[in-house]
Amino acid sequence: MLKIALPNKGRLADDARELFRDAGLEVRAHSERALTASLGGEFQALFVRAQDIPEFIADGAADVGVTGRDLIEESGRAIREVADLGFGRCRLAVAARDDSGFAGIGDLPAGARVATTFPRITTRFFAERGCRAEIVPISGAAEIAPHIGIADVIVDLVSTGSTLRVNGLREVETVLDSTARLVVADDPARLDDAQRAAVDELAAALLSVLRARSQRYLMANVPRDRMSQVREIVPGLNGPTVIDILNGGTMVAVHAVVPADGVFRTIARLKALGAEGILITRIERLMA
């Protein structure tokens, strides 16, 4: 049984559950407040705070986990990233008051006070940049700190930047970019061969779902004599699949995987070549 630590609440929790469900590992819990749940077969979920997951992994309470890169870096624990899962995208940034006049951390006075809930990352960042600063650890609501004299700037998580703007702050530098990661302990002896194989299979399943979300499966009947142009429009992963149609005569069937974000243009270009019976479907899994 592989124990998987998953966030117990918030956006990371929702996105993680959705991804696992789409990969065929739906959470099967007795109630919404359950601390553990079956994911089917050889996997068991443990629901804990996202910031505690690096500790669970490093201490051996869980074999594998899903949490943000920012929390992994802040923990300072020996954690190895298996896969970047892409969701939970945000950045840790230095922010100052709109009227501060600071364009970057180089403009800060020596010994400037920096309020943050990420003291480890912040200390390292300022040290690497050769800036002397006093780090002020806080437990939340960092946005108020520059307005009440607690700090000159803050280091906090930013997604859209709307919270900073509402509170009269602006970003001056990015400390790191973060997304959700699938992680294990950075100790080869922690998992046996069967568990390592299970982790690899889990990562492959999750990544196949993520890969599929950005692609669509296209089928169309196209004129046989326009195939050179069709190949330019729908190159597919390894070229389009071309199939003769029974009694199709001048038409052949083309199947290909195409990027989802440009599928409307692909359809228009195929129709301009005389394509018919164009069908676009979603893909559940796409293995590399």
Image (cartoon, rainbow, N blue to C red):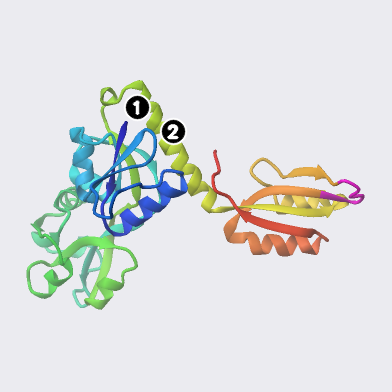
Residue type at the position of mark 1: Gln
Comparing 234 with 104, the one in front is 234
Element at label 2: helix
Amino acid of disc 2? Glu
The residue sitting at 54% across, 53% down in the picture is 214
The stretch of residues the image draws in magenta is: 246-252
How far across and down, in percent of the image, does residue 11 sit? 32, 59
Mostly what secondary structure, the magenta segment? loop
The percent coordinates of residue 109 (x first, y second) are 12, 64
**Looking at the image, is 197 positioned above or below residue 103?**
above
* Disc with the residue nearer the chain's start (1 vs 2): 1
* Residue 281 colored in magenta in the image: no
| Residue highlighted by disc 2 | 201
Whole-percent x and y of residue 31?
28, 53
Does residue 186 appear left or right of residue 154 in this picture?
right
Q: Which residue is mark 1?
A: 195
Instruction: Say which residue appears at 41% left-offset and 32% top-offset.
Output: 200
Residue 119: image x %, image y %?
14, 52
Per the image, label 1 sits on a secondary structure element best described as helix
Quarter-of-image position of residue 185: top left
